[in-house]
Amino acid sequence: MEWIFVAILIISIIHVTEEYFGGFVEQMKRFVPELDLSNFASVNMMFIALGFISVIVGSASLIYSLSIAALIFINAFFHIGGAIQLKGYSAGLISALLLYIPVSIYAYYYYWISGALTQTDVILSIVLGAIWMIIAFVHQFIQISIKKVET
């Protein structure tokens, strides 16, 4: 079942591509005017790196690897929220709905029914996935703050 982590990495790249070409940075500037392409690029490079690591470690570290499934699931809801705020398309929404949500649910479902996961593992991986999202926000806040100080 290691292919699921490869699939998560691939759909993450698809998602970031949709965000880029869909104008994510421009859309988010309505809420965070200081956001720019360098913020977007650095966060997404870290995100893709986390996904790549999950491909390498796979089921040998299910808590870590499934934390990336949790991260993409959580991220999907940020896109849903963005679409609500924008009253329309939020760049990344299509891949979030069609890929992120079903693939992340399937990853957890598969490992749960296979007996490889405990309730504690599920909780820890979800908490870690949320921590990854928080780190992304903190990273962006720090980058924006540094740029403000430099100018």
Image: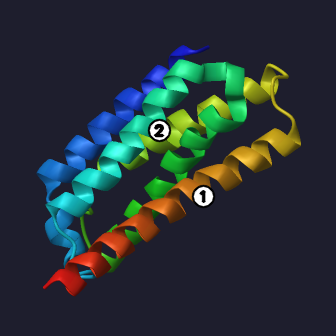
In the image, taking residue 46 as reference, residue 28 lies left or right, namely left
Decide if residue 48 is in sight here: yes
Q: Which residue type carries mark 1?
A: Ala
**Label 1 residue SS:** helix
Badge 2 density bin: few <14, some 14–19, many ≥20, Cα 10 Å:
some
**Dot placed on the residue nearer the N-terminal end, 1 or 2:** 2
**In the image, what residue occupies the spot 23% across and 52% down?**
41
Q: Is residue 31 above or below residue 88?
A: below
Q: Is residue 5 above or below residue 17?
A: above
Name the mark on residue 130: 1
Q: Quadrant of the N terminus?
A: top right
The reply to whether callout 1 and callout 2 are in contact (CB within 8 Å) is no
**In the image, what residue occupies the spot 40% across and 36% down?**
49
In the image, taking residue 56 as reference, residue 92 lies left or right, namely left
Q: Nearer the viewer, residue 13 or 112?
A: 13
Residue 82, quarter of picture: bottom left
Decide if residue 8 is in sight here: no
Q: Is residue 5 above or below residue 14?
A: above
Q: Position of residue 70 (x, y in %)?
A: 59, 46
Label tally: 2
Q: Position of residue 149 (x, y in %)?
A: 23, 85
Q: Position of residue 35 (x, y in %)?
A: 22, 72
Q: Position of residue 88 (x, y in %)?
A: 25, 69
In the image, taking residue 140 as reference, residue 118 lies left or right, namely right
**In the image, what residue occupies the spot 40% across and 65% down?**
139
Q: Which residue type carries mark 2?
A: Leu
In the image, taking residue 147 as reference, residue 77 lies left or right, namely right
Check disc 2 and report the residue beneath it.
Answer: 50
**Label 2 residue SS:** helix
